[in-house]
Amino acid sequence: GPSCWEDVLIPNRIAGTCQSRNCHGDIAEFYFKCGAHPTSDSETSVALNLITTNTQHITCITCTDI
C-alpha cells in the first residue's frame, strides 16, 4: 500500500489487483476528501495518517472544492 504522498499523487505508481466483478484493472487509483469531510466509521476507505496542505490542488471527491 501507499507509504508516502508520492505513492498516491503520482499516477500508475502502485500496482494492484481489482477485486470487483468484471474488473480487470491493475493500477491503484486514489481519491481525496478535504478536511471539511472527515471519514466516517461506515466508510470502507482508508485514511492516510498524513495531513498536509493541498499544494497539488487536488479536488475534493465530496464537494469538488480545491
Image (cartoon, grey):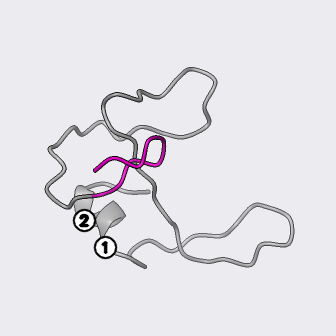
Mark 2 belongs to which amino acid? Glu
- For the N terminus, the image quarter is bottom left
SS under mark 2: helix
Most common secondary structure along the magenta stretch: loop
Outermost residue to the right:
21
What is the span of residues highlighted in magenta in the rendered image? 58-66
Q: Is residue 43 magenta?
A: no
Which of the 4 image quarters holds residue 56? Answer: bottom left
Residue 28 x %, y %: 52, 67
SS under mark 1: loop
Residue 37 x %, y %: 41, 29
Vertical arrangement, residue 39 with respect to residue 7, above or below? above
In the picture of the structure, the residue carrying the numbered disc 1 is 10
In the picture of the structure, the residue carrying the numbered disc 2 is 6
Vertical arrangement, residue 16 with respect to residue 39, above or below? below
Residue 30 x %, y %: 46, 59
Mark 1 belongs to which amino acid? Ile
Q: Give the residue at x 24% y 65%.
A: 6
Q: Are marks 2 and 1 in contact (CB under 8 Å)?
A: yes
